[in-house]
Image (cartoon, grey):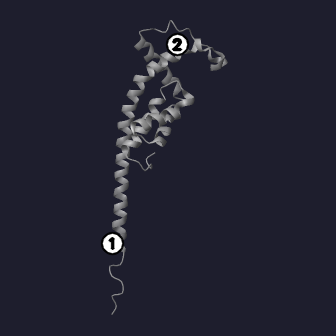
Amino acid sequence: MLRLSASPHAIAAGFAAGVMVSFTPFVGLHFVLAAILAFVTGGNILASALGTALGNPLTFPFIWAASYRMGLLIMGGNGASHPPIDMSLGLFAHSWDTLMPVLTTMLIGAVPLGIIAWIVFYFLVRTIVRSFQAARQRRFEEHAARKDAVAPTSLGSEG
């Protein structure tokens, strides 16, 4: 990600868009949603795809539990209105009537958590990319200066 040839803002906004979308329960659409959000915020679309990697099989249980809890908090509920869903048979073994209340609660909770994550990752990635790009520019300038110092100053001065 640090080697992308884009502005620190574009890389950071793109990556943050991917992170933000990872909080939604729309797993199959994360790349598409992140690309759209990156486009809207002036972010790099490739960086948005990399940002979606924050949501992965190791982190999804924590992200979705936090999104669900935040959704319940926002909606003023305690989860009693949503009976537990047995996922041992898979997602498609359930009707939309069963899934929609849970997905809606998760989506409502994902919005503030995603916004917070966007802000945190935007500033973190922008700072890192700025530092990396500045250090890379200094290395290029130092290399060019050394190359100029070694180059002969005059050619054909015999005679």
Q: Nearer the viewer, mark 1 or mark 2?
A: 2
Q: Earlier in the sequence, mark 1 or mark 2?
A: 2
Q: Quadrant of residue 86?
A: top right
Pointer 1 residue: 149
User: 135 or 112, which lies in front?
Assistant: 112
Mark 2 Cα-neighbour bin, 10 Å: few <14, some 14–19, many ≥20: some
SS of the residue under disc 1: helix
User: Between 139 and 85, which is closer to the camera in this rendering?
Assistant: 85
Estimate the x, y position of residue 74 in percent, counting from the top left. Answer: 40, 14
The three-letter amino acid code for the residue at tag 1 is Ala
Relative placement, left or right, of 144 versus 106 is left
Report the residue that reaches farthest toward the top: 80
The one of 90 and 39 positioned closer to us in this rendering:
39
Residue 52 against residue 85 in the figure, above or below: below
Mark 1 and mark 2: span between their CA atoms?
A: 70 Å
When the figure is inspected, residue 28 is found, relative to residue 75, above or below; the finding is below
Q: Position of residue 72 (x, y in %)?
A: 44, 13
Query: Split into 4 quadrants, where in the image is the C terminus?
Result: bottom left
What residue is drawn where x is 32% and y is 79%? Answer: 153
Give above or below for 30 relative to 154: above
Q: Which residue is mark 2?
A: 101
